[in-house]
Image (tube, rainbow, N blue to C red):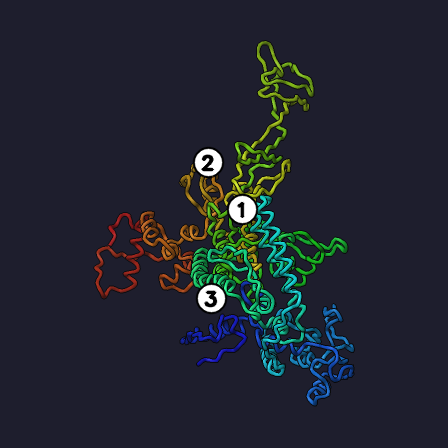
Amino acid sequence: AIKLHPLVCAAFNADFDGDQMAVHVPLSQKAVEEALNLMLAPRNLLKPANGEPIVGPSKDMVLGVYYLTLMEDGHQGEGHVFGSMEEVVTAYNLGYVHIHAKIKLEVDTYFKENHERYADGKPRKRVIETSPGRVIFNQVLPPEMQFVNRVLDKGGINSLINRVYRLLGDEVTIELVDQIKDIGFKYATVSGTTIAIADLTVPEEREEILENSLKRVNEIDRQFRRGLLTEEEQYQRTIEQWNEAKDQVEKAVRNAMDPGSPIAIMALSGAGKGGFGPITQLAGMRGLMADPQGRIIPVPIQSNFRQGLNALEYFISTHGARKGLADTALRTADAGYLTRRLVDIAQDILVMDDDCGTNKGIWVRRKDNFGKQTLAERIYGRVSAETITDQETGEIIISVGEMFTESKAERVDALGVEQVYVFSPMTCEMSRGICAKCYGIDLARGKMVEQGTAVGIVAAQSIGEPGTQLTLRTFHTGGTASAGGDITQGLPRVEELFEARQRPKGEAVITEIGGIAEIRVVDGVRHVFVTDTHLVEDVYEVPEGFEIKVEHNEQIEAGGILAEKDSEVLTATRAGRVVMDGGVLKVVWEATDEADYEIPAGMRLLIEDGQRINPGDQLTEGSKNPHRILEILGKDAVTQYLLQEVQKVYRPQGQNIHDKHFEVIIRKMLSKVQVTASGDTDMLPGELVEAPVFQAKNEEIMEEGGEPAQAKPVLLGVSKAALNTESFLSASSFQHTIKVLAGAAIAGREDELFGLKENVIIGKLIPAGTGFHRRKKAEVSSEAAKAEELPEPMDLSGTLIDDNTDLEILEAIAAQKVLGKGDSASEESEPA
C-alpha cells in the first residue's frame, strides 16, 4: 500500500475508505524535471479557485491544536510567572503546571494585545497572560509569527498558514504545516478525547420550545380553516415556525453543553463536520425532512436520536435519507457533465499578452459582497483601472495599471470606498485569449499571471469541482419561495444560468421602460401598466422671407400655422407649446411610452401601485431572464447579473470561488454578435460572428467606403458556445460529431489549432505553459525565415513519386500543390 501524507488528502480528495490511486512514472529527463518543478505537492500550496492554502490540517490535527491552545481558570500552576518559553515547557514536563493554566510570561512578540501586528514589523518585549499549551504551540512557529496568543480553531489555523505563506514564502510554510500536523496528532492523543452517549445533554427548555411551536402551528391551522390564509401561506408559515423552533433548540443545546466537554470541543474546533448541526439532531430535535420531490414535509421530527424516534417519525426520516442517497448518485454525473461543458467552452482561453491596451473595466461594488466577504477580498490581485487617492492626505494609494496587493486592497477597503473600477476578463479586448492585465493575479502562484497560462481550464475546473457538493434540491424554504413555484437552487440553478435558458424556471416579469407603475385588474387578471411621459422637441427651420405667425410659449394645434410667405405655409406636425430659441423655432410636446404586463395568477408582485420604476426592474418574484436583461440594459448589466446569481448558489454552500473564474466563462458566453443587417460585407443576417472578427470586417468595408454591417450582442449557453467555437476539431469532440464535421467539410473550414483540445486530438504539444513559449519562438523564427530570400522553387514537373522519393522533394511538391490554388508561379506549369 502507498502511504499518503495527511495534509495532501484535501487536495487529492482522498479518504481512507478504500480509495485507489494511480501511480504515474515520468520517463524522460524533461518529464522528471517537469514533475519536480511543477507537480510536486510543495509547489502547489494554494488552491487555484480562491488563492487560499489547500494544505491545511483537519480533523484530529485541528482537535489537537484547539485543545493545546485552550486556556481555563483554576488549573494547577495558575499565576506563576516565567522568564522564557523554555522554562514554561520544562515546568509543564515536570508536572508543575497544567497545560491550560493561566500563567504570566515575558516574551518577544510581533503582535499587540488585539492580535494586530506592530506597524514597524519589529518585536517588543512584553509580559503576557498565556498558557503552557500556547507556549508549546508557539515554539513550532517561525520567530516572525510569534506570539500567537488565542484559541485556534480550524479557521484560525488556516488563516495563520495563509499569513505565513504571504509573509515568508513556501519553504517556511511547508515546514510549519508539517510541524502543526505532528503537534496536532500528538496533543489530540494527549487530550484523551472520547465521547459517550452521556455527553449528549438534552436541554430542559426543549419541551417548552416544542410546546409553544405546536400552539402556534395549531393557531395557523385554525386561521386556514376559517379561510383567513391560503393553503400556500399556511404551508409557508408552518415551515417557518418549525425552522424557528429548531434554531431555538440548537441554541439551547449549545448553552446546555459544557464548553469543555469532548463533543463541544469537536464542534467548536471545526474538527467535526457541520458544527452543532449533527449534535442538534442527536440531542435536540431532528427537524423538518424533505420528501423525494424535494418538498419539505410540514410535519417535523420532534424527537432526537438520543431519545429515539417513534415509528411515524422513523418513516418520515427515511424519506430524507433515501433522497440524500439518490441525490448523491445523480449529482455526481450532473456535476461531471457541467465541468465537461465548461472545459469545452473555455479550453482555448490562454493568457496571450501582457496588456491588450483597453481602458474599460468593471465596477466591484461593496453592496454586492456576500455574507462576511469584504471589498478587499474581492479586489485583491486585480489590476486597478482607476487612480485611488486618500481624500484626507491626498496620497495616491494605487494608480491605473497597478495590482492590488493585500495591503493596498485593505487600505482602499478601509477608506470606505463604495465601488472600485478594475480590469476584468469580461472587458479584455484581445481578439484571442485574454491579457495578463485584465486577468490579474495567478491565484495558485500568488503573483501576476504569466503568458501561456491556461486560465480557461483553471476557471472551468474551479467552478465544476465543487459542483458535487452543491445541493440538488428545489426547495420551498420559509419566506423565499412562494406560489410562484419552486425556486431552483444548487446545481440545477448553476446549469440554468450557464446554459442561458430562454425560459428560466419561475421567470419573473421585468419591465422594459421606466415610469410610474399602476396595478389594475382586467377581467379577473392582474395587469401592471407602466407609463412614462417625457418632453420631446420638434425643431422647425424657418426659410428666408417667411413671417413667423406665433408667439413664444403659445399653445398650437397640430396643423397650426407657424410661419407663412404669400401662399406658402409652415405648419406644426404635432400639437404643443412654441419655444423661440434665437432664430430657431421649436414645438415642445409630451410623449408618452406605455407598456402593459399581464401578471400570471399566483405570482407575488414586488412593486406597489404608483411606484416609480426603472427599465429592467423586476415586477414579480422569480428569476430574471438573462436574455431580457441583455436586450433592455445591455452587456454590462447581464454580466453582473450572471456573476451575482451564480455566486448566490456557491457562497451559501461555503464554496469560495473567485469572481474572475466566472468572468472568464461569461466572457466566452458573450463573445459573439448576431448580424442583423449585412451592409456591404459578406456576413449574412442571423449569422453568429465573433465580436472582434465582426469589428475587423466592418473597419475593412468602411475604409473602402462601403456600408458596415449591423449586429446585436447575443448570450449563448455554454453548450451552444462550445459548438460554435472557431475550431471544428474541438467542437466535433464535444457533441454532434457528424453534424459538426459535415458542416466544416461543406464550408471548407480550416482549423488553426489554437486551443488545447484540437492539439491533443492530432497529437501535438498543447500551446500552453512551456508549449506556449515554444510556439511563440517558432512563430518568431518562421517570420524571420519568411523575411529572408525565398529559395528558387525546384523544377518538379514530371517527377515520379515512389517509396524511395526523398522527403525534401515530397515536401516541395506538396508546397507547390498548395501554392497552385492561384499562385502565379505554378499557374503556367502543370502541377506534378
Instruction: Say which quadrant the N terminus sits in.
Output: bottom left
Residue 13 image position (x, y, % from top left): 49, 70
Considering every residue shown, the one lying at the far bottom of the view is 94
Left or right position of 537 against 746:
right
User: Which residue was labeled with disc 1?
Assistant: 483
Q: Quadrant of residue 436?
A: bottom right
Q: Quadrant of residue 168?
A: bottom right
Q: Is residue 466 above or below residue 226?
A: below
Q: Secondary structure at mark 1?
A: loop
Q: Nearest to the eye among marks 2 and 1: give it.
A: 1
Residue 27 image position (x, y, % from top left): 40, 76
Which mark is first along the chain, 1 or 3? 1
- Measure the alpha-carbon separation of dots 2 and 1: 52 Å
User: Which residue was labeled with disc 3?
Assistant: 770
Number of the label disc, if any, that sits on residue 707: 2
* x 55%, y 59%: residue: 300
Three-letter code, disc 3? Thr
* x 56%, y 39%: residue: 511
- Measure the alpha-carbon separation of dots 3 and 1: 56 Å
